[in-house]
Amino acid sequence: MMDAVTALAIGVGTFGAILIGVLVAVWRPIGVTRMLRVVALTLTAFAAVVLAPAFHSYLMTVPLLAVTLPFLAMLGRRLAALADVVGAILLAGWGLILAPNVGAAFLPSAGLLAAAAIATRDRRPWPVEAAATGTAGER
């Protein structure tokens, strides 16, 4: 059974992920992958801090390490998309299989890391920018 602390962590994480998704869809920032990774790190750290007193604090090291890996890869400019995929799989696997009650608080961060991996590989122009420059559909 879920207590109030777990529900708070899940609610804040889900609301934060939805808010960031809307912001990215409406206002396509230049450093969208950096923003997604930083927000995933922030949401995971928040959930870990909120949930650590209620559960064993050593359980919180797996999600924190899974989110720190892509952030460090971004700072080192090496294999960031691969680190995003690995971090998202670790977070989702840990959240769904190993710690199903507590792990739901970390699933929004897994979604943000997956979105960062997709955004890293997506080099197509944004449709609004392409229409504004008159190059839509031209190669």
Image (cartoon, grey):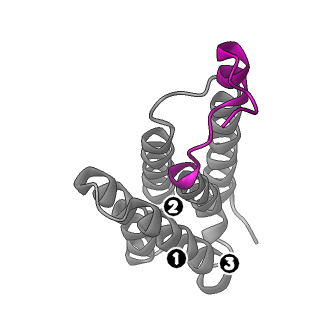
Disc number lying in front (3 or 2): 3
* Mark 3, residue position: 96
Name the residue at the left extreme.
Answer: 76
* Mark 2, residue position: 51
The image shows residue 42 at horizontal and vertical percentages of 44, 46
Mark pair 3, 1: CA separation: 10 Å
Q: Is residue 67 magenta?
A: no
User: Which amino acid is tagged 3?
Assistant: Leu
Callout 3 secondary element: helix
- Say whether marks 3 and 1 touch (CB < 8 Å): no
Q: What is the span of residues highlighted in magenta in the rendered image?
A: 119-139
Q: Nearer the viewer, residue 15 or 71?
A: 71
* Mark 1, residue position: 90
Q: Is residue 102 left or right of residue 40?
A: right
The image shows residue 9 at horizontal and vertical percentages of 60, 52
Vertical placement of residue 60 versus 7, above or below? below
User: Which amino acid is tagged 2?
Assistant: Leu
Q: Dot 1, crowdedness within 10 Å: few (<14), some or many (≥20)? A: some
Disc number lying in front (3 or 1): 1
Determine which quarter of the picture holds residue 97. Answer: bottom right
The image shows residue 19 at horizontal and vertical percentages of 67, 34
